[in-house]
Image: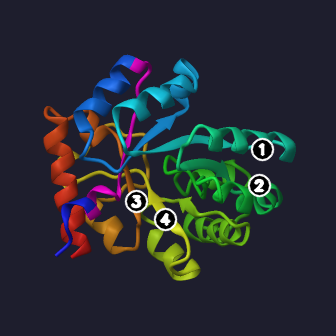
Amino acid sequence: MIVPSQAKDRLIFALDFPDRERALSSVKQLNGLVGCFKVGLELFISEGPSVIDAIQELSDADIFLDLKLHDIPATMRGALRSAARHGVRFVTVHCQEGEVLSKTTEELSSAGLEILAVSVLTSLSGNDLQALGIQEGLTLSRLAVQRAVFAKEAGCAGVVCSGKEVSAIRQAVGDGLHLVVPGIRPEWSRLDKDDQSRITTPTEAIRDGADYLVVGRPIRKATDPKEAARKILDEIASALS
């Protein structure tokens, strides 16, 4: 039987708030129930790096800096080194940055920073590919697998991918890469209007090979966020067992 702490370590809560007050309120409420707090673009741009320090003062959970970096090599290297100095565990980049990643991964991993490459955004559907100039005949699944293999070769610690592609990616890359899955929607928390096109349940994602689940709205919008987090932990533990 999987002990609760093992399930907790796989749960990442998305602090998708516009200000520090609401974000830190959730950190206090969910401390001890999640293994990692994700700081995305909205909160980071609103509050700056100081919000990371504030979270670290309130919780021992890891921090996932989800900025999806994409720039010229020198700027990327500088940004990743700055992220490492803030003591975060994860930072996201776009998969195209192979050369800069391969040159900096070893240096940054020694500082405890794990680089996650974004494969294909979970908001995209198959109909979006042609509009984005993706070659005809290349499916979302094949594109995600290609980018995951590229990320592994570049030395990334993991990839962010949809639950719909996690099984194919796991088969392609083996066990040497963290698979982080957003777009998690438990059956009891389906949304009528959702900007995530490729969603999956906690149970499906874990059974298909996910290592970490990023959950935002199902917890954030719940009447009792702590109880919602506990229900997701139960699903993770059950899937792991």
Q: Position of residue 181 (x, y in %)?
A: 43, 57
Asked which quadrant contains residue 157, the reply is bottom right
Q: Which amino acid does label 1 sit on?
A: Met
Q: What residue type is labelled 3?
A: Tyr
Q: Which of marks 2 and 1 is nearer the N terminus?
A: 1
Is residue 192 at all visible to an observer of this figure?
Answer: no
Q: Marks 4/3: CA distance?
A: 7 Å
Q: Position of residue 141 (x, y in %)?
A: 55, 68
**Discs 3, 1 touching: Cβ within 8 Å:** no
Q: Which of marks 1 and 4 is nearer the N terminus?
A: 1
Magenta stretch holds residue 168: no
Magenta stretch: give its range.
6-20
**Discs 3, 2 touching: Cβ within 8 Å:** no
Q: Which residue is located at x 45 percent, y 41 percent?
A: 38
Is residue 176 at all visible to an observer of this figure?
Answer: yes
- Secondary structure of residue under mark 2: loop
Q: Mark 1 points at which residue?
A: 76
Looking at the image, residue 132 sits to the left or right of residue 160; the answer is right
Quadrant placement of the C terminus: bottom left
Q: Earlier in the sequence, mark 4 or mark 3?
A: 4
Q: Mark 4 points at which residue?
A: 179
- Secondary structure of residue under mark 4: strand
Characterize the local packing of mark 2: few (<14), some (14-19) or many (20 or more) Cα atoms within 10 angstroms: some
Magenta stretch holds residue 9: yes
Q: Which residue is located at x 43 percent, y 65 percent?
A: 164
